[in-house]
Every structure is written in C-alpha cells, then in structure tokens.
Amino acid sequence: MDVIGQFEQYLVENGIAPKTIESYVGDVRGFYEYLARMGVDDPADLKRFYVVSYKNHLVENNYAVATINKKINSLQAFNLFLIDRRLTDEQVVTLRKDRIKVAAGSEGEVEVFSEQEVNQLLFFVQDRSRVSLRNQLIVHLLLYTGVRVSELCGIRLSDLDFLTNTLRVTGKGGKYREIPLRPELAEIVKEYVRTDRQKSKFAESPYLLVSQRAEKMHKDAVNTMLEALGRQLGLRMYPHKFRHTFCTRLLKKGVPLTTVSKLAGHAHIQTTAHYYINTSKEEKEKAVRLL
C-alpha cells in the first residue's frame, strides 16, 4: 500500500467522517502531483520548502483563501500521520504559520453538540423503548471518554477497573492511556455486562461491546446506529463529533490543554490546540454581548 493509501486507512481507523477523509486524501494527492511536476521523487520525505512552495503556487494561481486553508489543514493532518508512523520526525506544517489569515468569523468551526443537544440526547437514550442499553452505553462512552470509534470497538472487559473506575484505552501506535469513568457511566457499564450482554450468544467474548452477529462490534455498526439515532433527534451524529464535544466541553470548563491532550490520546499537544483552541461561533457571540 502506498503512503496515501496508508494515510487513508489511518483516517478511517480514527473514525474521521467519510467526506472529510475524501477531502484530506484528495488534497494530499494534489500536493503529490505538484511535487511530481517539480521533480520530487519521495514526497513522504516532507520538507518545509515543499509546503511553502505549494502554498505560493496556490496563491499565484488565484485559489480562494478558504480552499488554500483547507488544503493546508489536510497537509497538517498528513504531516501528523507521517510523524505517527515514524516516516518523518518533524512537523513542518502548522496552521498558525501556514493558514492565510482571513476576516474574523470566517474560519472553520469544529462541529460539536451544544449543551442543549447533549441534554436532549441524554434524555432520549434513557428511554429503553427507543434505545437499547448497549446503545445508551455507546453514547455515554463516546460523550464522556472522547474515545475514537476504533478505540471504542476495541475495549476489552479486562480494560475496565471498577475498583478505581478507570478505562484503559489502547490508542494509535499501541499507546495506552487511562481515562477516569464517571460513576454514572461505570454503573451503565456494569448493568450492560450483567444483563443484556449476558443474553448474547457472544457473552464469552473478551470485548465489551458485542453485536448480534459478531463478538466485537464493528465501527460501521456504530456509525449506522448513530446516524439512525440522529435522524430520530434531528441531529447530525457521527463518532468524531462526540470526541470534538468531549474536548471542547473540557476546555470550556477550564481544564488545561495539556490534560485534555492526554485524555484525548493526542501524540502532540499541537493537535489538540489545532482542533479545539478556537471557540465556537456561539461562544464568540456570547462574548461580544458582554461588552
């Protein structure tokens, strides 16, 4: 598999939305094509000079600012992937340096659930006539641990410690991190393990979340479930939106960026800063109303 193919697989494994994956991969292919025309044989050997030259090329060819910034965003994601896979050891793309400054308010916002939507969702999943205990557990795990969908599906019973109410998560590159569980979430886990899971034909599975067809729930099944739930609630729902919400809510409550980065399992604090340092449009409006 070529490097772009590996990058695409990496995005899929981390639960990135399909449309975003398509955008990132398309942008990186465009970058590769530019470098090939410039005689570069190994684009994976990413250099700062390549990025600056490509950005200048886009500007000179009158690409829209939003389009250029989207491509820079994709290249940063690619750069972080190369670092994660040890194909390079230097971050040469940073949004602070490379994004073209635009008028305030026109930058892209991270998509998160509002507090009202979080409450609406939590009330809805309480209703056992509409949502199974397992699916309620999935929503709570995504919302209160910020795990990637691949990490969610990979949770084993042995990863749970009910004495300390902690979850051990195996992240990218086989790295482990521990996430404290809220008491209410720990109780939902115990109830699911004690009841619904025991009735499954895969009750002996080492994995926490089982489906009707397999001993380990597949991320596609999680996506499908969330999409159906979203249709019932009139909300756009996908796994990474929960992760964005988890990190954003922590930062809003004053949790230090370094702590949020560790809980999210980001290899670099710059990744956390890139996604979550911008406040939401709603927060900006609230701030201005205080004047």
Image (tube, grey):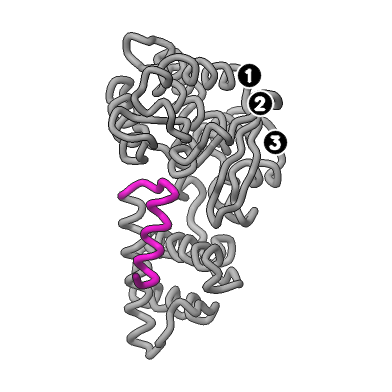
Marking on residue 54: none
Figure check: 259 above or below 191: below
At a point 50% along the width and 15% down the height, the residue shown is 191
Figure check: 42 above or below 73: below
- Residue under pointer 3: 255
Q: Position of residue 133 (x, y in %)?
A: 41, 17
Using the rendered view, name the quadrant where residue 62 is placed.
bottom left
At label 1, which amino acid type do we have?
Pro
Using the rendered view, name the quadrant where residue 86 is placed.
bottom right
Query: Viewed as shown, does residue 146 lie left or right of 37?
Result: right
Q: Residue furthest bottom?
A: 39
Marking on residue 183: 1
Marking on residue 165: 2
Q: Nearer the viewer, mark 2 or mark 1?
A: 2
Instruction: Give the residues drawn in magenta, as a range.
Output: 1-18
At label 2, which amino acid type do we have?
Asn
Q: Determine contact: label 2, label 1, CB under 8 Å.
A: yes
Instruction: Identify the secondary structure beneath mark 2.
Output: loop
Q: Which badge, 2 or 3, comes first in the chain's sequence?
A: 2
Residue 254 seen in this snapshot: yes
For label 3, the crowd category at 10 Å Cα-Cα, with few meaning under 14, some 14 to 19 and many 20 or more, is few
**Which of the two residues, 251 or 104, is positioned nearer the viewer here?**
251
